[in-house]
């Protein structure tokens, strides 16, 4: 599903942030992306989200060489990907329901088609009674669950999550991780960027470990 | 409802926030520009309509002026002039103005003075049934032969001057209108850039969840078309109210002589049914201009930022 071959990334004329990355991620797998702050985790996630192009090397995703794709095609390919941002990125003027339904609205589905699905998913993540509430009234954990629901509502092939448990208490972060595991069992490929060693030990999934922009182990 | 249709609300919900400072500013701007455009357009229509009416009024009459000449009998000359005029093709009727009517014409320039001691030229008014067929050259030559001191005034020079004046005003008005529309488009570009910058977070999130530039542009364009239509309608209604108020002021508030002058010049100070249709068309043009300009600006913005 994803193949990096000797990929490097630099911003403008600056030094390389990511160097010599070569790895392969199979469909339906679950990976942790780890490393200290500044190691390049977020940059690697941006490459995987197709919001950056590599400075060198080759990236193949969903059977296409994304380094050579036109901009419009990249935007189309993003529909295969769900993303959970560390800072949620929920739109403040939309309700929880509308935020979660956004990917389906973008795909041109009419409200009647997705209303029940969105409501069901919100119930599943424990936000059934917060559907018509705006994000400013949600707690950190509720926002995180809404962001996750938005990322998975369109049944993406790949789910990327950037420090998804960084803003919530240990009990909730454990629940959120179990939610990702459940999604993975349903067939979604998942890459979770985290620096919480507790998770890494408890959930024995392969890791992509970065240090100073290089892949230091691929367990 | 209109906005819902324009912004795709029927597909679920409105992605671009309905109320924002940039949106209100843009609507105010479009309202003001539409008002200025409509007043300019209405003014041009008024001048043009009035010039056509003046020219047509004057064109339906010509005048024969007979100077008193020693040894000539004025009444006899008047009769001959009337007969010659009425015998000319395209003339429906000719009649001489009385001494009193002639003095009344001079009164605005000379005041109330006794003109009985002066030898004032007499006028014969020639009304035309068909100005296009009237043979002025033949009438002028017959008058020159049969009526000493008679001259024919077709008002051609005056009509030419009034048409030139009206044409100049119309061209100047249309130029002003074009400049206002260009200024509107430029202001919309700046306002759109401001709106897009203030909605950058929405654009980024839409990009991240796979929205195409076309989808995002359509969402914003619906919003801008709605702003253009609302702003245009406010400005257009404001301009119509302005013309109605101006008509009311000329009819009731201004002292009689001033009102009379304005009424003579501009009739009821309203641009008429055709003019009103023009104002509605102008509102639509400004709404479409706003939407088209903003769409172009949104596209440029979207292609400039990283996906």
Image: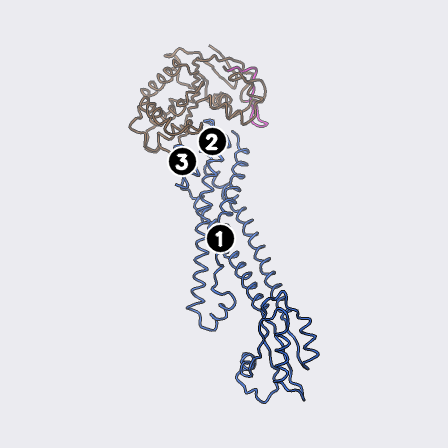
Chain colours: A brown, B blue
Q: Which residue is located at x 44 percent, y 14 percent? A: A31
The disc, 1 or 3, on the residue closer to the chain's N-terminal end is 3
Which residue is tagged 1?
A: B277
Residue A10: say if magenta.
yes
* Callout in the foreground (1, 2): 1
**Chain for disc number 2:** B
Which residue is tagged 2?
A: B204
> In the rendered view, does A80 fall on the left or right side of B65?
left
How far, Cα to Cα, is label 2 from label 3? 20 Å
For the magenta stretch, what is the residue range? A2-16
CB-based contact (under 8 Å), mark 1 and mark 3 = no
Residue at the extreme left? A129
- Which quarter of the figure has residue A175? top left
| Tag 1 and tag 3 share a subunit | yes
Q: Residues within 10 Å of mark 3 (few under 14, many from 20)?
A: some
Q: Which mark is residue B9?
A: 3
Expressed as whole percent of the image width and height from the top left, the position of residue B120 reads 61, 84
* Callout in the foreground (1, 3): 1
* Callout in the foreground (2, 3): 3
Return the residue nearer the eye: A112 or A144: A112
Expressed as whole percent of the image width and height from the top left, the position of residue B31 reads 46, 50
**Chain for disc number 3:** B
What secondary structure is found at the residue carrying circle 3? helix
Expressed as whole percent of the image width and height from the top left, the position of residue B41 reads 52, 56
Expressed as whole percent of the image width and height from the top left, the position of residue A57 reads 58, 18
What number of labels is visible? 3
Query: Could you tell me what secondary structure mostly forms the magenta stretch?
Result: strand
Q: Which residue is located at x 63 percent, y 69 percent? A: B89
How far, Cα to Cα, is label 1 from label 3? 31 Å
What secondary structure is found at the residue carrying circle 2? helix
Residue B98: say if magenta.
no
Return the residue nearer the eye: B162 or B18: B162
């Amino acid at each position: 599903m994803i193949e990096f071959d000797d990929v490097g990334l630099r911003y403008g004329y600056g030094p390389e942030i990511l160097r010599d990355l070569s790895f392969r991620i199979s469909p339906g797998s679950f990976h942790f992306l780890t490393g200290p702050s500044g190691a390049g985790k977020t940059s690697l996630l941006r490459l995987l989200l197709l919001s950056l192009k590599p400075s060198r090397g080759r990236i193949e995703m969903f059977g296409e060489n994304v380094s050579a794709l036109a901009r419009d095609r990249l935007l189309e390919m993003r529909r295969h990907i769900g993303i959970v941002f560390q800072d949620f990125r929920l739109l403040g003027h939309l309700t929880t329901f509308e935020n979660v339904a956004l990917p389906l609205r973008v795909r041109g589905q009419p409200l009647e088609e997705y209303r029940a699905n969105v409501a069901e998913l919100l119930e599943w993540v424990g936000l059934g009674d917060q559907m018509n509430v705006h994000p400013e009234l949600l707690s950190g954990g509720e926002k995180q669950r809404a962001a996750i629901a938005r990322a998975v509502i369109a049944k993406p092939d790949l789910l990327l999550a950037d420090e998804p448990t960084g803003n919530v208490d240990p009990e909730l972060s454990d629940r959120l991780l179990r939610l990702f595991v459940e999604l993975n069992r349903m067939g979604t490929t998942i890459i979770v960027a985290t620096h919480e060693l507790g998770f890494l030990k408890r959930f024995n999934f392969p890791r992509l470990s970065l240090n100073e922009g290089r892949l230091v182990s691929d367990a | 409802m209109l906005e819902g249709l324009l912004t795709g609300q029927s597909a679920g919900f409105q992605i671009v926030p309905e109320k924002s400072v940039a949106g209100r500013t843009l609507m105010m701007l479009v309202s003001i520009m539409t008002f200025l455009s409509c007043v300019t357009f209405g003014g041009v229509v008024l001048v043009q309509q009035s010039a056509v009416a003046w020219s047509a009024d004057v064109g339906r009459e010509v005048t024969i002026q007979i100077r008193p000449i020693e040894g000539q009998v004025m009444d006899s000359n008047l009769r001959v002039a009337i007969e010659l005029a009425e015998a000319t093709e395209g003339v429906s009727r000719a009649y001489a103005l009385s001494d009193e009517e002639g003095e009344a014409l001079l009164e605005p320039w000379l005041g109330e003075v006794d003109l009985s001691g002066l030898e004032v030229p007499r006028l014969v008014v020639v009304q035309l049934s068909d100005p296009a067929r009237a043979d002025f050259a033949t009438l002028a030559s017959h008058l020159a032969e049969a009526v000493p001191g008679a001259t024919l005034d077709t008002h051609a020079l005056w009509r030419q001057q009034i048409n030139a004046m009206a044409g100049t005003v119309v061209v100047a008005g249309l130029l002003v209108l074009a400049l206002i529309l260009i200024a509107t488009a430029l202001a919309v570009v700046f306002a759109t850039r401001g709106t897009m910058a203030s909605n950058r977070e929405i654009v980024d999130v839409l990009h991240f969840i796979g929205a195409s530039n076309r989808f995002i542009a359509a969402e914003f364009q619906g919003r801008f078309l709605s702003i253009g239509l609302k702003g245009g309608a406010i400005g257009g209604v404001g301009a119509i109210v302005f013309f109605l108020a101006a008509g009311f002021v000329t009819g009731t508030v201004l002292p009689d002589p001033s009102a009379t002058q304005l009424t003579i010049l501009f009739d009821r100070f309203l641009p008429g049914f055709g003019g009103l249709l023009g104002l509605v068309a102008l509102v639509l043009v400004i709404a479409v201009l706003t939407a088209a300009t903003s769409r172009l600006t949104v596209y440029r913005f979207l292609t400039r930022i990283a996906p």
